C-alpha cells in the first residue's frame, strides 16, 4: 500500500511538472494603452495610445514583461492655463505573479505586478516652447490574461506608478501570440 501511495505521489508531481513546462514560452502583443495623470491640482487624461509588449512565462506562476507605450493628446493642464500638446512615452519592465488555471482548451491567469517604469514626456506650450522631462518609478499593478491552446492571448491590466508628486494610471488591453 505504501508503494502505491508513493507511486501515485510521484506520478502526481511529475504531471504538475509537465503542466508547468507546457505553459512556459515567449509571447508578443500589441494593443491600446490609456494614461491618466493626477496631482493635487487636478487630473488630465492623455487618451488612448498604442502599446507593444514582449513577455516570457517561466511556468504557471511567474512571468516577465517588457513593454513600450506612447500616448499623446491635447490636454488642459491647470498650471499653464492653456491647452497643450502633451506626449508621453513609457518603457516598463516587470514581473507578473499569479496562477494560470487550466480550463481545458484555454488558460486564465489573474496576477499581480511589480515593476519599474521609465517615463519620457514632452509638452509644447505657447509661452515656454517645448518642455521635456524624464522620470522613473517602481510600480504595482494587477491584471488578467486569457490564453487559448493555439497560442492567442488577451491581456487586461492596470498599473500604478508614481512620478514624484504625479500619480499615473495606466490601463491597457493587448492581444498577442504565445510561442
Image: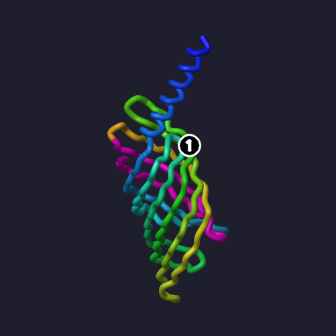
Count of marks placed on residues:
1
Task: Name the residue rendered at 43%, 52% in the picture.
Answer: 173
Task: Name the residue rendered at 37%, 50% in the picture.
Answer: 175
- Asked whether residue 152 is in view, the answer is yes
Quadrant (top left/top right/bottom left/bottom right) for the N terminus:
top right
Q: Residue 119: image x %, image y %?
A: 53, 70
Q: Which residues are magenta?
A: 151-179
Occupied quadrant, residue 165? bottom right
- Asked whether residue 41 is in view, the answer is no
Q: Nearer the viewer, residue 151 or 41?
A: 151
Asked if residue 87 is among those painted magenta in the image, a careful observer would answer: no
Q: Which residue is mark 1?
A: 98
Q: Nearer the viewer, residue 73 or 93?
A: 93
Determine the secondary structure under disc 1.
strand
Judge whether 21 appears above or below 176 on screen: above
Q: How is the image coloured?
A: rainbow
Please identify the residue farthest to the front as the structure is shown.
Answer: 3
Q: Is residue 165 left or right of residue 65?
A: right
Task: Name the residue rendered at 54%, 42% in the picture.
Answer: 61
Q: Residues within 10 Å of mark 1 (few under 14, many from 20)?
A: some
Occupied quadrant, residue 38? bottom right
Q: Residue 134: image x %, image y %?
A: 55, 76
Amino acid at each position: 500500500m505504501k508503494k502505491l501511495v508513493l507511486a501515485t505521489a510521484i506520478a502526481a508531481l511529475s504531471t504538475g511538472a509537465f503542466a508547468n513546462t507546457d505553459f512556459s514560452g515567449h509571447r508578443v502583443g500589441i494593443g491600446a494603452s490609456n494614461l491618466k495623470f493626477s496631482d493635487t491640482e487636478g487630473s488630465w487624461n492623455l487618451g488612448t495610445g498604442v502599446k507593444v509588449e514582449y513577455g516570457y512565462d517561466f511556468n504557471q506562476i511567474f512571468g516577465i514583461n517588457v513593454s513600450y507605450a506612447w500616448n499623446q493628446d491635447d490636454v488642459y493642464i491647470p498650471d499653464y492655463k492653456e491647452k497643450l500638446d502633451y506626449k508621453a512615452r513609457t518603457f516598463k519592465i516587470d514581473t507578473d505573479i499569479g496562477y494560470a488555471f487550466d480550463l481545458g482548451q484555454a488558460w486564465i491567469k489573474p496576477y499581480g505586478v511589480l515593476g519599474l517604469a521609465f517615463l519620457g514626456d514632452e509638452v509644447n506650450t505657447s509661452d515656454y516652447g517645448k518642455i521635456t522631462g524624464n522620470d522613473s518609478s517602481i510600480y504595482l499593478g494587477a491584471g488578467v490574461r486569457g490564453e487559448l491552446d493555439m497560442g492567442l492571448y488577451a491581456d487586461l491590466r492596470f498599473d500604478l506608478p508614481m512620478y514624484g508628486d504625479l500619480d499615473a494610471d495606466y490601463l491597457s488591453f493587448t492581444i498577442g501570440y504565445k510561442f
